[in-house]
Image (spheres, grey):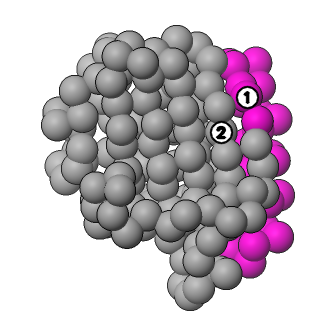
């Protein structure tokens, strides 16, 4: 997994596929919408499964750690990307990114970004006191765009 800085080598989205706000009550519906959009982009069954797991982990992190409400944008450029944002208090990204080793299980969490890193081509994180934005790209056998 590559972890470039947010301003370097990140695709710029040209075709928004899905834009939605979510809370805990919306997770199931949004997962289905992400799956349907991914299928239309040509991901195969395994790629879709991994992609939906990664996106779901990001949404769960928002619900659990980012204030309970977030925004998701599914985008197409050269590849399928997802951007999830919240307005939580942010976190120290150095502790979690890049997620090279599996973190120990704990009541506070800490495994979500590691799981995302295993399922996505890259993981870009921008976090501060005004919130967090994370962008990931789907892992695929070839170009989707």
Residue appearing at x 69%, y 19% in the figure:
23
Residue appearing at x 51%, y 18% in the figure:
87
Q: Position of residue 106 (x, y in %)?
A: 27, 20
**What whole-number distance in Å separates the C-alpha atoms at marks 1 and 2?**
6 Å
Which quadrant holds the N terminus?
A: bottom left
Looking at the image, residue 117 sits to the left or right of residue 100; the answer is: right
Q: Quadrant of residue 92?
A: top left
Pointers 1 and 2 in contact (C-beta within 8 Å)? yes
Residue appearing at x 82%, y 35% in the figure:
29
For mark 1, give the secondary structure: strand
Q: Position of residue 121 (x, y in %)?
A: 42, 66
Within the magenta stretch, is there residue 33?
A: yes
Residue 48 in view here: no
Looking at the image, residue 74 sits to the left or right of residue 137; the answer is: right
Residue appearing at x 45%, y 42% in the figure:
134
Q: Which residues are magenta?
A: 20-49
Q: Within 10 angstroms of label 1, few (less than 14), some, or many (20 or more) residues?
A: some
**Which circle marks residue 21 in the picture?**
1
Q: Which residue is mark 2?
A: 72
């Amino acid at each position: 997994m590559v972890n470039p800085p947010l301003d370097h080598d990140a695709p710029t989205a040209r075709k928004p596929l899905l834009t939605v706000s979510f809370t805990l009550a919306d997770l199931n519906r949004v997962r289905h919408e992400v799956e349907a959009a991914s299928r239309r982009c040509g991901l195969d069954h395994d790629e879709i499964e991994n992609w939906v797991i990664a996106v779901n982990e990001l949404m769960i992190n928002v619900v659990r750690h980012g204030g309970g409400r977030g925004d998701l944008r599914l985008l197409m450029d050269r590849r399928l990307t997802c951007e999830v944002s919240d307005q939580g208090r942010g976190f120290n990204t150095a502790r979690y990114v890049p997620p090279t080793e599996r973190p120990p299980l704990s009541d506070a969490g800490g495994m979500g970004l590691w799981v995302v890193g295993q399922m996505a081509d890259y993981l870009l994180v921008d976090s501060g006191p005004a919130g967090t934005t994370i962008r990931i790209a789907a892992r695929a056998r070839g170009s989707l765009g």
